Image (cartoon, rainbow, N blue to C red):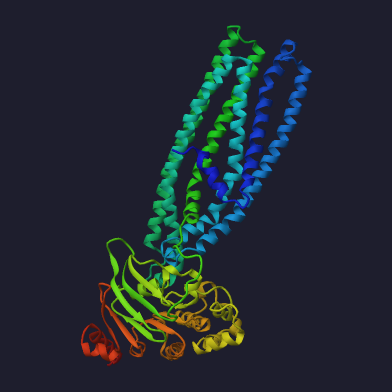
Amino acid sequence: MNLPLTDIIPRCRRMLARPEAMRAVITIAVIAGLLEGAALGALLPTVTALATDRTVWGLGFTAWLWVLAGLTLTTFVANYLSNRWGYSIALDFLKNIHRLVGNRVTRQPLGWFAQSRAGRLSRIVSTELMTTGEILAHMIVPLISRTAAAGVIIVVSWCWDPLLGLVLTGAVPVFILLTIASTTLMRRATRRTTPAQEELADRIVEFAQCQGALRSCGRSEDFGPLRHAMDDARTTKLRALGIETGGLLLSGAATQGVIVILISVTGSLAVSGILDPVPALAFIGLAMRFTSTLSAITENAMGIEGRRAVLDGLDEVLTAEPLPEPSAPADLTAPGTVSLDHVTFSYSADTPVLRDVTLEVPSGEMVALVGPSGSGKTTVARLVSRFYDTDTGTVRVGGVPVTSQTTEQLMSQLSMVFQDVYLFDDTLLENIRVGREDATDNDVLEAATLAGAHHIAARLADGWGSRVGEGGRALSGGERQRVAIARALLKKAPIVLLDEATSALDIENEANIVAAVDTLRTRATVITIAHRLDTIARADVIVQLNNRGQVEAQGTHEDLMCLDGTYARYWRHLHEAQGWRLVE
C-alpha cells in the first residue's frame, strides 16, 4: 500500500516544467515546519519561566519572549515563502500539463483515439486538472510542514520531560494507523466513483453529439444510457460519500480520544506533584496543538488520496506508449504502391477482422474494396494508415513496411477521406487549406472547385470566408465530405484512401466527386471503399472480401463477373436496385 507521499511527489515532479523547483518547495516547507514546531515547543519553558520566575535552560522569561518573537517572525516568513512557492509550482503544473498531454496525445496511433476517451480526457484537462493543482498548492506543502512541526514538538517534549515525550510519541502510531485506514477508505471510495463519473461524461458527450438521431427517433427527452449513467453515478457517489464520512468520523473520534488520554495523563502528573500546575496547563495546550497537527496531517493525506484518480488518469495518458517507429525516414523502394502480405488483424483477442489477407496495389492504379459490412474493408485502410499494427503479416507503403517508417514519412504519402469528417471552427477556405498549410489561395480554390466545394461557398453568406462551426455543424454531411475530398486533392499525396467518399452526396455532387477521383487517378494511387456502381466499375482492380475477412477474389470488373461468384451476385443486386421506382 502506498502512503500519500511515497508516489505522489515523484509523479507530480515529472509533470513540472521545472522539476527542481519541487525540491526547493519541500525544503522551505520543512524549514517552516521546524520553525513552527520550535515556536510551539518554546511555550513550555516560557510559561515555566513566567510561573516560577526562574531561568529555564539558562534563559529568563524576557529572553524566552524574545526567542518566541524571533521564531514567530521567521516562521511567518518561512510559511509565506512555502505557500508562495507552492502556488508557483501549482501554476507551473497547470501550465505544463496541457503541453505534456498534448505532446503525448499527438504521438499516439490514430487507433488509440477510437477508444472511449472523450469524456475522460475532457474531465482530466478541465475541472479535474484544477483539482489536481490543489495537491501542490494546498496539500503537499502543509502536510510536509505539519509533519516537521510534529517531529520538533516530540523532540522538545522529550527534552522537557521524558515521560511527557513518551506520552506524545505514543500518539504517533495511532495517527499513522488512522492515516492508513482513512486513505484506504478514500481510495476505495474513489475507485467506485471514478468509472461511474467517466461513464457519465462519455454519455453526456454522446447525448450532445447524437441529438439529430435521437430527435428523429423521439428519444431526445429520455435517453436511457444517459439516465442509467446518471443513476449509477449518483448511487456510487452516495456510497463513496458514506465511506469518506466513515473515514472522517474515524479521524475525529481518534483525535478526540487521543486528546482525552493526553489531558488525563497530564492532569494525573500535575495532581501527583510530578508537574507544576502552570507547566501542566501549558503542556495540555501543546498536546492539543500537537493532536490537531496530526489530525490535519491525516486530512491532508485523505485529500491527496481523493485526487489520486486524477493523477492516475494523467499518468495513463503520459505513459501511453506510441507505436514504435525508427528515428530516421526509410528509403522508399516503390513509391506510390501499397501491399498487404498475409495480414491477420483483430481489434479484440480471438475475433479476427482480417484473415491472411494478401493484395497488391500498383502505383497509379485504382483499387476498389467491396464486401459485406464487417468484412474488414475499412480495417484495411486503417492498417495502411497505421492506426494499428497487424497481428501477423506485413503492410507496405512505398515498398517499405509501415513499421519501418516515421509517422511523418508515412502520413506524407497518404491522403485520407473517411466517413467521419471533422471540420474546425474556422472559415471554409482555411478548413480546406488544412490539406496543405503552405498552399496559396488559388491552389485551395482549384482543389475546392474540383471537389464541388464551390457550391458550398456560393450558398454561404460570407462565401469562402464563412465559418463552418465546431465540427462543421453549419454544413451538411455531404458538404463536409466534399471539404475532406478537397483537402485530399490539395495535399497531392501519392496515395489516396477513400472510405465511402460519396456516401452522403446527392447525384449532382457525386458527379463532382467522380470527376475529382478521375483527376486523382492521373497522379496518385487510389484505394476506395464504395458501394456505388460507377465507383466500383471504374476501378482497375476490385478486391472482394467475404464476411470472414478473407480475400475471396480479385481482378477487373469483367474478371469477377465471369467468375459468377459473390461479386457478380452483389453487382446484379445493386444494378437491380438502381432500377427500382415507385408506382401507383
User: Is residue 460 among the parts visible in the rendering?
Assistant: yes
Task: Name the residue rendered at 69%, 17% in the picture.
Answer: 45
Residue 386 appears anywhere in the view: no
Q: Residue furthest top?
A: 273
Image quadrant assignment for residue 22: top right
Residue at x 47%, y 73% (from the top left corner): 410
Q: How many marks?
A: 0
Residue 204 pos. (x, y %): 45, 61
Figure check: 537 above or below 31: below
Q: With 355 as the anchor, is 363 left or right in this view?
A: right
In the image, residue 48 sits, relative to residue 311, either above or below, namely above
Pick the front one: 357 or 425: 357
Furthest residue toward left: 564
In which quadrant of the rendered image does the C terminus lie?
A: bottom left
- Judging depth in this view, the residue of 511 and 557 nearest the camera is 557
Residue 263: image x %, image y %? Answer: 56, 18
Q: Nearer the viewer, residue 176 or 23?
A: 23
The quadrant of the image that shows the N terminus is top left
Q: Position of residue 557 (x, y in %)?
A: 29, 89
Image vertical order of residue 422 relative to residue 235, above or below: below
Q: In the image, 185: left or right of 43?
A: left
Question: Percent x, y for residue 574?
Answer: 28, 87
